[in-house]
Amino acid sequence: MLDTTQSDTTAPPEERRGCLFALSQPPLMIFLAVIGCLLLMASLHDLLML
């Protein structure tokens, strides 16, 4: 009879997480949104006010 107890206790290999997983993190998205807003405000200021 085959012994399957060892295969039951081994965890599956961890999935590789790429760039999309990193971008889905809320603190990073908040940081990127703030930087994007600052760049947008600066570019609009240069285009419209100067």
Image (cartoon, grey):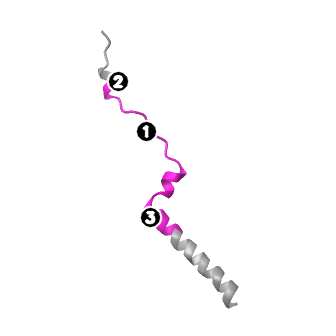
Mark 2 and mark 1 in contact? Answer it, CB < 8 Å: no
Q: Position of residue 3 (x, y in %)?
A: 31, 15
Few, some or many residues within 10 Å of mark 2 (<14, 14–19, 20+): few
Name the residue beneath numbered marker 3.
27
Q: Which residues are magenta?
A: 8-32
As helix, strand or loop, the secondary structure at mark 2 comes to helix
Q: Nearer the viewer, residue 5 or 49?
A: 49
Residue 39 sits inside the magenta stretch: no
Name the outermost residue toward the bottom: 49
Q: Earlier in the sequence, mark 2 or mark 1?
A: 2
- The residues tagged by marks 2 and 1 sit, at their Cα atoms, a distance apart of 16 Å
Kindly report the distance in space between the C-alpha atoms of the residues bearing marks 3 and 2: 38 Å
Label 3 sits on a secondary structure element that is: helix
Of helix, strand and loop, which one carries label 1? loop
For residue 7, which numbered disc appears in the image? 2
Total count of labels: 3
The residue to which callout 1 is attached is: 14
Q: Inspect the image, locate mark 3, and give the three-letter code of the amino acid beneath it.
A: Pro
The vertical placement of 2 against 18, above or below, is above
Quadrant of res 2: top left
